[in-house]
Amino acid sequence: MKKQLIIIGILFMAAAGVLMALNLASDAPNKGKNGFNRKFISDAIVSSEKAAYKNIFMTICGWDDKYIYYSCMVPGRIYRSGYDMKALDTLKLDLPEIHKLVPLFNTFVNYPDISITGGNARVVIIGDLRQNTYKAYNVDTLFSAGFTSGGSSFVMKTINKEKFYMAFVKYDTAQKHVSTILEPFGDLPDAFFNYDGKLIYDQLSGKYVYVTFYGNSIITFDTSLNVDYRARTIDTINNPLSSAAHLGNGITHGAPPVHVNNEITSDGKFIYVYANLQADNEQDDNAGYHIDLYQITDGQYSGSFYLPKHNADPLVALKHLKGNTLLALHKKQVIKYTLKDLAALSK
Amino acid sequence: MRWKRISIEIISILFIVLWVYAGLSKLFDYQNFKFQLGRSPYVQHMAGFVAVALPLGELIIAVLLVFTRTRLLGLYLSFFTMLLFTGYIYIMLHYSYFIPCSCGGILSEMGWDTHLVFNVVFTILALVAILLSGKLYFRKFLPQTAS
C-alpha cells in the first residue's frame, strides 16, 4: 500500500509538472512587456452598487432616462430595471416565429422602438414595445451584427462570400436594398475573421464605432457609412493576433486568437474600450479590468482606469448610461458604477 | 477478496472501452483532431506530435489493461493520463485565453464542464482500482529488493 501511494504521489507531481510546463510554454498575452504605457485617471470611480438581481442576461440592449433594458438568450423576452437596480420587469414580446433566430441575434432598444437583427436567420425585426407589435423583414445578405440609426435602415457587418473580406453595408429593410458599402480593410482576405470586432452605435454623437478584437484598429463612420477617422488603440499590436482556416463550407480560427480588445461602449464624448493587454507601467496583472478612454471626435487616447475584478466572475459586457453611469455585466452579477466627471479630458 | 477482483475488472473494462473509443475516433478523424489541437493555447506548437502520440498511447494503455500481468501498469497509466486530461480541462476553463474543442467522438457532445466531471469520475475510478489491487503485478519491471 505504501509503495502504491508513493507511485500515485509521483504520478500526481509528474502530471502537475507537465501541465505547468504547458502553461509556461503557451503564448498567453501579458507574459512579457507589450511595449506601451497607460496614463491612469485618479479616482475615476466615485461609487459602485451591485444589482439586487442576478445576471440572467445576454447583454445590455438599451437605456433611457428611467430604465435599463437587458436582452437574454430568448429573443422574445427582454428585462427592464430602474436605475435603483432593485426590481426587474419581464417584457414578453409577441414576436413572429423565426427559424434559426437563436443564438445569433442582437437586440437594440430605443424606447419605444426595438429592433432585433438575426444573422443566421437573415432577418430584421422592427417593433414597438408600447404596442407590442413587430414586423419581420428578410434580409438577402449574410451579416453578423446590425444596428439601426432610426427608421427602416440598418448598418450591418457582413462578408464578401467569395473572398471572405469584411464589409459594412447600409441595408434598407423596406426597399430590400443595400444602398452603401464600406470595406474598412480593403480587400484583405479573411478580414472578416482576423479583423473581427465590436460595432456599436453612439446615439449621442450619431456615429458608428468599430474596434477590432485582435488588433488595435478603431474606425468611426456616420450613418451614410462615410468614414470619420481611423485611429489606433494604445497597444502596439498592428497585425491581428489571429489566423483564419477554411474548412469545407465554413471558416474558423486556425490558431488560438489573442483578444487585444474585448468590449466597447461610448457616451457621446469618449469611447470606452475594455482592453486585455497589460501596459509596461503596470505591475499587478490582477489590479482590475483595463478600461481605456479615447476621444470619440478623433480617437485620441485620453487615459485609463480599472474596473474592479470580482472573485473570478468575468466581465462580459459594458454600457455607458445617462450621466456618469457605467454598467458592468459580469457572468453572475450586474454592477453600476458612478464615474467622476471626465469632461475635463474631452476636447 | 472476490469483490475487489470484480471491481478491478469492471473498472478495467470501462477504461478499455474508453481508451479504444477515444483512440480510434481520434485516429479515424486525424486531420480534424490535429487541426483542433492546433487551436489549443497549450498544445498548439506540438499539435502534430500529440495528434499521433495521444491516440496511440490510449490504444497501448487499452492493451495493457487487457492482460492480468500488465493490468496494474495500465491502471497507473490510466490514472496518470486522466490526471493530465482533468488538469488540462481545468486550466482551459479557468486560465485559458481561448477555448476550442478537441475531443473524440461522443465526448465532443459534452460541454467543457460536463467533460471535467466525467474526467474526475474516471480519475477516481482509476485510483480506486489501483488501491484495491493490493499488490504490484509488475514486479518484473522493477528492481528486485529483499523483502
Image (cartoon, coloured by chain):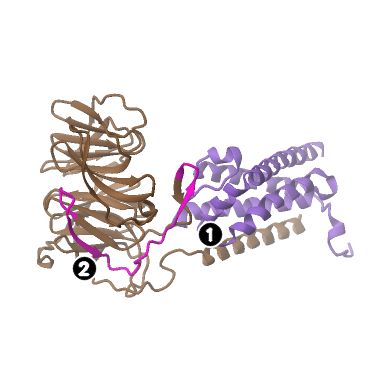
Quarter the N terminus of chain A occupies? bottom right
Are both tags, 2 and 1, on one chain?
Answer: no
All told, the count of numbered labels is 2
Please report the residue visible at 66 percent of the width from the left and 46 percent of the height from the top: B27
Q: Which chain is brown?
A: A
Magenta range: A221-250
- Where's residue B139, x and y in %? 86, 57
> Which residue is tagged 1?
B42
* Residue A332 seen: no
In this image, A185 relative to A223: left or right?
right
Viewer-proximal residue among B141 and A39: A39
Is A244 part of what is drawn in magenta? yes
> Which residue is tagged 2?
A303
Tell me which chain the residue with mark 2 is part of: A
In the image, residue A53 sits, relative to residue A258, either above or below, namely: above
What secondary structure is marked by label 2?
A: strand
- Where's residue A127, x and y in %? 18, 30
Q: Main secondary structure of the magenta part?
A: loop
